[in-house]
């Protein structure tokens, strides 16, 4: 398997960890395949390191330790042409649908710049054609969006245009950082559906970064749950969410406010002071120990490795350290994608699309 | 973030925009930008005065011995004459544009230097930033007028207007550098800059196409501020006698008026002319600056 | 401090706040924007009422209208807001600014959107409390203020040591709990919370909502929760009002609304919520909300409604009681030979 993008032993530290600095990401090894399209979620609270992870993968941040490889080349030392190819193949969608637009220009600017810089079109007319096609593909009407300024469009429209932009470049990987959290609820499903379509139809891999477990469940195949810079659980999304093994994942799942008055929030949470929580992050111990309802003495003395009890599920918790018969499971100390489940082929056909219905009837009205 | 009291997400924008927006085109624009319009009008009048003046009065009369000395304002000499026989109307017509020119040149030089240094320091950061910031910070603490006086006093021979401008601008670039640097620092982290990087734009392209356009309001306001400061500095130097002795600038007029005891001798018109023109200049510059501030910062506008 | 929200709740039938025909319009250069166009609902003592809607639905504007903090170019143009306080009924909409200022915080308190980011960064938490309390009760000795503050901090589950800190030293969840404590410092009868957890993570969100619930129980206050997260509202409120384009399109108990959503918009909204039941199924609500500038006559949901009828384009449906305490504004439930006859 050729890796499109690979992180090896990446650690990112801000400031001096002994003097109140933070370890944003700790020793992460993770790769994205170049040949098979994947849809992976990175889930965590703020402070989990998920945004830092995105910045490192996009080349905006050089990690304190470890390396990032693009098609085998170390990004830190790669030349201009490698970087150009990297930019072409790895794109992003950001959270704020307003901030990504330069208020001085019309929204066309967001689409025209990459066309120009990556030489995607032969002439102006071709460029215009590409922009119109991309906009239509995300369900927008070019005549209603091109030529407008960002403040003249709604948040949902603006976010769709950023998806259109990502589409123009036909990248191999799109890193989507909270793409729908600032968009209205009724539009979220449509945008996520578009992303999933891009993944299934055009073979574009996605790294979906979010704190919303429900959408992560809806849209991805595999998931990484992060807590204070470490991956605490990873594997196939069905298993990790429906049969969570790590106490933090369980806490997350039980805290989801389900739109069902009969199923109220789960069991009580363990109280921990802010101090305890931040101290645990620095010491050599399980960072979740202060909040863990199943905490054991050894959790406060050692940091648990990522145990690998099942084919497609790994959990960094000492609860896993014993199969019950004295045997211990493997430890996933290399690329965590080894615990990922393959994409379920049946998902490729079942898509109930209210959106696509009206598309047949003449376009999604925006 | 739009204010919570305003409905978002309606297709019709009620947000503020300075482009060809609502309200009867030009008149609406004038009403909305009252300060800017007033300031520009006053400046316009001053410029017209300078431009059309030579049609009504011989500019040669701004030199000494051109007319009867010490004449009160009258039909023949609307601004009167001074002790050395200068027609003060001619002096005004010649001196005002000279004063404005000094301000313009000095302001422009200061702004150009300030922009280049400010953007470089802000965007590139690192050692470059430390060096630029260090130099400008140190120079900011230097008492400007003292330095200017020293420089001006030590220039042998006659100072030209252009030289005045350069002298003044040498100490006027630091403030624009600092303010522009701060703006760039805040703009640098915006998501659209990240987008530009992802779209393959190189550093100099980002600076020119993404950052500069958003700096324009600040650049304009900074420019006006620099012009004001430059005019003030040049008038200050001139009033102390350190200006171009052979040019009838407004500041030099004040110098001559004070040297020849105009007030004690009741020749009030000699001082009033330069003072009124200077005051008008500063009022217009202030209004323009305040008006530009309103454009740059939409929250200051009257209606949101 | 884990208070279970699922405790059995009995809600009083005595009203504490009654909004009738509230209209808030914005008079802009382009015309009149009818942000809130005739809202009526009643809040009972100790009740939790949710106001749900998307951007532009008017829910935040309604909250600001009740607090009389609407700023130019917006104005309350119609309606009254009846506050049942101390055996009196006061119309908040007609109070003079100074009278309203006294009612604010003391009777009706609000935790505005993004309030945790609006804490004064150069003042310590204790000073925030001093400012709030002294603004209403002039001569309270400092010792009393500190005592009350400690009690309030305890109520929201924060250590007294928090008082000496500056806002930036607190986490998002802690700041929001401080805002809750500030809003209840004068023991109001009604607490309005506008998107109190929008920037917070699931776990912190739950903690904050539990805090709000505990505070409410302790004060026997009523809560209006304004938000767009149906899941959150389902977990927290007793009754729910669904807003669309400045109007209330459905009101009912949480159970009624989720078990039997009457209005097509409510149905679509509930259907579009992602669940942990099915992967890969995406149902959005196509279209865009209408412009509130010159709203068309007729039902404002008409262009996007899957159940629309001819009459919907011309006549705006009034809110009718379709089943006990469950109201909907939709022609499907009106008389005149349409599908269902109203009970």
Image (spheres, coloured by chain):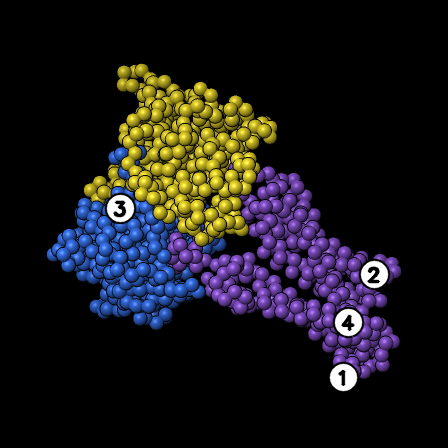
- Measured in 3D between alpha carbons, the distance from the residue under mark 2 to the one under mark 4, in whole angstroms, is 24 Å
Are the numbered discs 4 and 3 placed on the same chain, yes or no? no
Marks 2/4 in contact by CB < 8 Å: the verdict is no
| Residue C126 in sight from this viewpoint | no
Assess disc 2: are there few (<14), some (14-19) or many (≥20) residues with their C-alpha within 10 Å of its C-alpha. Answer: some
Mark 1 or 2: in front is 1
Residue, x 43% and y 59% (percent of image)?
B14
| Residue A323 in sight from this viewpoint | yes
Quadrant in the picture for the N terminus of chain A: top left
Residue C231 image point, x, y percent: 28, 44
Q: Secondary structure at mark 2?
A: loop
- Measured in 3D between alpha carbons, the distance from the residue under mark 3 to the one under mark 2, in whole angstroms, is 79 Å
Q: Is residue B177 left or right of residue B95?
A: left
Residue, x 84% and y 58% (percent of image)?
B154
How many marks are shown on the rendered structure?
4
Q: Which residue is mark 1?
A: B75
Q: Which residue is mark 4?
A: B54
Q: Which residue is mark 3?
A: C268
Chain letter of the residue beneath label 4 in the structure image:
B
Are the numbered discs 2 and 4 placed on the same chain, yes or no? yes
Hue used for the chain lettered B: purple
Are the numbered discs 4 and 1 placed on the same chain, yes or no? yes
Q: Which residue is mark 2?
A: B159
């Amino acid at each position: 398997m050729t890796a499109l993008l690979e992180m090896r032993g990446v650690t990112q530290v801000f400031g001096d960890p002994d003097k109140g600095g933070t370890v944003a990401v700790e020793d992460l090894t993770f790769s994205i395949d170049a040949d098979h399209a994947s849809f992976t979620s990175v889930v965590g609270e703020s402070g989990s390191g998920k945004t830092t992870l995105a910045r490192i993968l996009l080349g905006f941040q050089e990690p304190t330790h470890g390396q990032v490889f693009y098609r085998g080349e170390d990004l830190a030392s790669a030349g201009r042409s490698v970087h150009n190819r990297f930019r072409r193949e790895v794109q992003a969608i950001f959270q704020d649908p307003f901030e990504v637009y330069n208020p001085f220009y019309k929204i066309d600017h967001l689409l025209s710049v990459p066309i120009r810089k990556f030489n995607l079109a032969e002439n102006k007319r071709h460029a215009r054609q590409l922009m119109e096609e991309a906009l239509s593909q995300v369900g927008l009407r070019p005549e209603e969006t091109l030529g407008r300024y960002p403040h003249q469009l709604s948040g949902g429209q603006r976010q769709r245009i950023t998806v259109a932009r990502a589409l123009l470049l036909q990248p191999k990987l799109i890193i989507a950082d909270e793409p729908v959290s600032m968009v209205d609820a009724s539009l979220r499903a449509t945008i996520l559906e578009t992303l999933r379509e891009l993944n299934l139809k055009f073979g574009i891999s996605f790294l979906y970064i979010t704190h919303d477990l429900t959408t992560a469940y809806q849209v991805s195949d595999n998931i990484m749950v992060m807590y204070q810079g470490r991956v605490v659980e990873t594997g196939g999304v069905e298993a990790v969410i429906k049969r969570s093994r790590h106490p933090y994942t369980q806490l997350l799942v039980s805290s989801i406010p389900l739109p069902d008055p009969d199923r109220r929030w789960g069991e009580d949470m363990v109280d921990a002071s802010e101090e305890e929580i931040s101290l645990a992050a620095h010491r050599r111990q399980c960072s979740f120990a202060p909040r863990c309802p199943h905490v054991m003495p050894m959790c406060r003395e050692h940091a648990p490795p990522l145990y690998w009890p099942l084919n497609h599920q790994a959990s960094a918790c000492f609860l896993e350290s014993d199969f019950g018969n004295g045997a211990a499971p493997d430890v996933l100390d290399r690329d965590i994608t080894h615990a990922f489940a393959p994409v379920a082929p049946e998902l490729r056909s079942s898509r109930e699309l209210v959106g696509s219905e009206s598309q047949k009837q003449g376009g999604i009205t925006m | 973030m739009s204010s919570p009291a305003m409905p978002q997400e309606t297709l019709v924008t009620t947000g503020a925009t300075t482009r060809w927006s609502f309200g009867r085109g030009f008149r609406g624009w004038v009403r909305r930008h009252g300060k800017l319009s007033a300031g520009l009008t006053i400046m316009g009048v001053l410029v017209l005065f300078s431009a059309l003046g030579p049609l009504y009065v011989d500019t040669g009369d701004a030199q000494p011995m051109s007319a009867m000395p010490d004449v009160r304002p009258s039909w023949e000499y609307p601004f009167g004459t001074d002790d050395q026989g200068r027609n003060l109307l001619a002096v005004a017509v010649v001196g005002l544009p000279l004063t404005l020119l000094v301000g313009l040149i000095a302001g422009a030089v200061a702004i150009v230097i300030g922009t280049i240094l400010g953007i470089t320091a802000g965007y590139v950061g690192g050692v470059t930033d430390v060096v630029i910031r260090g130099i400008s910070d140190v120079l900011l603490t230097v008492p400007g007028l003292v330095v200017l006086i020293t420089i001006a006093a030590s220039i042998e021979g006659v100072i030209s207007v252009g030289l005045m401008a350069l002298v003044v601008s040498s100490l006027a670039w630091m403030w624009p550098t600092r303010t522009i640097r701060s703006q760039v620092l805040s703009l640098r982290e915006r998501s659209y800059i990240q987008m530009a990087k992802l779209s393959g734009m190189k550093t100099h392209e980002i600076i020119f196409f993404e950052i500069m356009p958003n700096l324009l309001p600040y650049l304009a306001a900074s420019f006006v501020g620099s012009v004001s400061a430059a005019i003030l500095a040049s008038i200050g130097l001139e009033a102390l006698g350190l200006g171009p002795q052979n040019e009838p600038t407004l500041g030099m007029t004040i110098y001559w008026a004070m040297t020849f005891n105009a007030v004690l001798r009741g020749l009030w018109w000699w001082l009033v002319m330069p003072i009124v023109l200077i005051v008008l200049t500063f009022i217009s510059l202030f209004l323009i600056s305040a008006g530009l501030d309103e454009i740059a910062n939409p929250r200051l506008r009257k209606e949101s | 401090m884990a208070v279970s929200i699922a405790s059995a709740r009995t809600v009083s039938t005595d009203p504490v706040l009654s909004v009738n025909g509230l209209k808030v319009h914005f008079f802009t250069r382009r015309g009149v924007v009818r942000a809130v166009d005739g809202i009526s609902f009643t809040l009972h003592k100790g009740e939790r009422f949710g106001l749900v809607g998307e951007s532009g639905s008017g829910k935040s504007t309604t909250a600001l209208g009740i607090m009389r903090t609407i700023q130019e170019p917006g104005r309350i143009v119609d309606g009254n807001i009846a506050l049942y306080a101390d055996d009196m009924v006061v119309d908040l909409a007609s109070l003079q600014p100074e009278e309203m200022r006294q009612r604010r915080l003391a009777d009706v308190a609000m935790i505005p959107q993004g309030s945790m980011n609006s804490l004064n960064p150069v003042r310590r938490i204790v000073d925030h409390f001093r400012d709030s309390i002294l603004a209403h009760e002039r001569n309270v000795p400092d010792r009393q203020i500190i005592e009350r503050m400690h009690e309030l901090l305890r109520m929201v589950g924060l250590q007294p040591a928090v008082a000496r800190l500056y806002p930036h030293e607190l986490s998002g969840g802690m700041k929001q709990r401080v805002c809750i404590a500030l809003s209840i410092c004068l023991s109001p009868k009604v607490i309005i919370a506008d998107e109190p957890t929008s920037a917070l993570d699931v776990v912190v969100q739950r903690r904050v909502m539990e805090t709000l619930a505990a505070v409410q129980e302790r004060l026997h206050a009523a809560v209006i929760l304004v938000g767009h997260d149906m899941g959150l509202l389902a977990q927290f409120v007793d009754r729910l009002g669904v807003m669309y384009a400045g109007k209330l399109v459905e009101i009912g108990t949480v159970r009624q609304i989720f078990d039997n959503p009457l209005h097509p918009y409510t149905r679509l909204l509930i259907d579009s919520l992602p669940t942990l039941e099915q992967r890969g199924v995406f149902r959005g609500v196509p279209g865009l909300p209408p412009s509130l500038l010159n709203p068309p006559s007729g039902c404002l949901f008409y262009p996007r409604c899957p159940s629309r009828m001819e009459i919907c384009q011309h006549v705006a449906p009034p809110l009718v009681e379709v089943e006990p305490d469950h109201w909907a504004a939709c022609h499907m439930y009106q008389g005149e030979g349409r599908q269902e006859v109203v009970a």
